[in-house]
Structure formats: structure tokens, C-alpha cells
Amino acid sequence: MRIFICFFLTLGAGCSNGAENRFKANQKKVTAGAPKEEPKKIVKEEVDYHDLVAEGAILVDVRTPVEFARGSVRGSKNVPYEALLQKLEAFGDKGQTIILFCESGRRAELARTILEQQGWTDVHNMGSHRDW
């Protein structure tokens, strides 16, 4: 009986190690051939935003009201990204030039995409409010 139990214990240990080794080998095969994805980068436009504002563009800070209250670009309006779809009237007609910005440019990029999906045609992501 002892031999029988020892046989099953060693067999079981061998199977789990074998299965684990096969899993690791297959994992290496799958990940070795997979293309490495680069993180999506936000490409900043080379635009003179001061000129666009002089020509009538609207400056929109898409940060939260608390962030906006700490300081923003003079003359900008605050339309938080989270409330963007509820406040589309703040952007004027769909031909209006709009310059969006936030803390880093990420929320502004998301807001730009939403506005373009809603029909606006001249929307710019300035990036950070510090870039003004």
C-alpha cells in the first residue's frame, strides 16, 4: 500500500510540474511572436493659439470646477469633461473654432474626439493650460 501511495504522489507531482512547464513554454511561444504595442501618444499640433483666439476661437478648460478655480487661461470658459455632453451649447455653432485644454492634454483630447463626433469641425487640443 505504501508503494502504491508513493507512486501516486510522485506521479501527481510529476504531472503538475510537467503541466506547469508546458504552460510556461506555450506562454513564451505566444508572447515571443506578439507585436509590441507602443502606448498611444498625443501628437501636439503646431498652431498659434493666440492668433486663433484673436480670430474668434473659444478657449475651453475641460478640467473640474475646482481645478479651474485654482487658475486658468484668461478669457477661457470652464466646461468640465465629465459634463461635456450636457453643455454642448457652450461651444456655439459647429463651425466655431474651439481650443481645448486641461492639466495634461488627455481630457482635452477626449473632449476633442467627442466634439468632432458631435459635428464640430475645427477643434484643437492645446494640451496643458500651462502651454498658453
Image (spheres, rainbow, N blue to C red):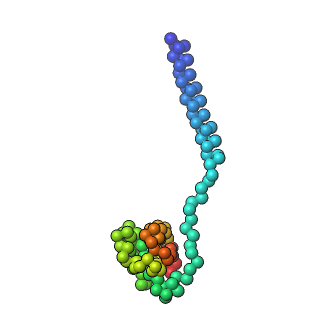
- x, y percentage for residue 32? 64, 46
Q: Image point 42% across, 84% down: which residue? A: 75
Q: Image point 56% across, 62% down: which residue? A: 40
Q: Quadrant of residue 66 in the image?
A: bottom left
Residue 104 makes an appearance in the image: no
Q: Quadrant of residue 102 in the image?
A: bottom left
Q: Quadrant of residue 81 in the image?
A: bottom left
- x, y percentage for residue 127? 51, 73
* In the displayed structure image, the side of residue 64 where residue 130 appears, left or right: right
Q: Image point 52% across, 78% down: which residue? A: 131
- x, y percentage for residue 20? 57, 34
Q: Image point 57% across, 60% down: which residue? A: 39
Q: Residue furthest bottom?
A: 54
Q: Residue furthest left?
A: 86
* In the displayed structure image, the side of residue 83 where residue 15 appears, left or right: right
Residue 13 makes an appearance in the image: yes
Q: Nearer the viewer, residue 6 or 49?
A: 49
Number of numbered labels in the structure image? 0
Q: Nearer the viewer, residue 7 or 19?
A: 19
* In the displayed structure image, the side of residue 9 where residue 84 appears, left or right: left
Q: Residue furthest top?
A: 1
- x, y percentage for residue 1? 50, 11
Compared with residue 94, is residue 24 higher up or lower down, i.e. above or below? above
